[in-house]
Image (spheres, rainbow, N blue to C red):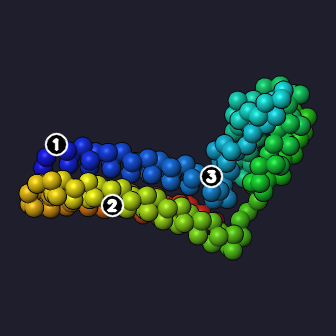
Amino acid sequence: MTEEIKMAIDEAKEQMSQAISHLTSQLQKIRAGKANPSMLDSVFVDYYGSQTPLAQVANVSTLDARTITVQPWEKAMLDEIAKGIMNSNLGLNPQNNGELIIINIPVLTEERRKELVKRAKAEGEDAKISIRNQRKDANNFIKELKDDGLSEDIAKRGEDEVQKVVDSFSTKVDALIDAKEKDIMTV
């Protein structure tokens, strides 16, 4: 294989890795019925006039599998934090006890679990589409090289190598989705 093909494959690998990273972050946002501090990563709080991530104004932790606690660094922020959680469309109901915010995570119904699995699979399909687009770009680059005089054998080997990379990343996507599905469906 030529150096140009190797560089194109490396570029495709980099883009595919980014697709996997994006998928991982999207899957973390899908709650599986268990309390997890990362569930509140998308919550922003009005901190003296500027929208600030919750993690920068409070300590977020879990008490048990069903309870998240938010301990603000300033007690004056309790109401703003509760408002930020309510406005985040996570379907969570924060309770302010004057010291900290307590969030009880409701048990998921079977129907809601199936919806979450569908959403996880849709995220996985988006990642696979991104990976396939990278394959298409790399193969188009190899075809251009072939048109410029690259031998048929080297072009074929390059395309085979691209397909191996695509297959390995698709397998990673499937594994992530299967793990998330198992996590969601486990009561």
- The residue that appears at 37% across and 62% down in the rendered structure is 132
Return the disc, 1 or 2, that comes first in the chain's sequence.
1
Dots 3, 2 in contact, CB < 8 A: no
The label on residue 29 is 3
Q: Is residue 120 above or below residue 98?
A: below
Label annotation for residue 58: none
Q: Secondary structure at mark 3?
A: helix
**In the visual, does 155 lie left or right of 87?**
left
Q: Which residue is mark 1?
A: 3
| Mark before the other along the chain sequence, 3 or 2 | 3
- The Cα–Cα distance between marks 3 and 2, rounded to whole angstroms, is 29 Å
Q: Amino acid at mark 2?
A: Lys
Mark linked to residue 136? 2
Instruction: Please state the horizontal and vertical placement of residue 75, each as a whole percent of the image.
Output: 87, 27
Which label's residue is closer to the chain start, 3 or 1? 1
Tell me the amino acid under the disc marked 3. Answer: Lys
Callout 1: SS = helix
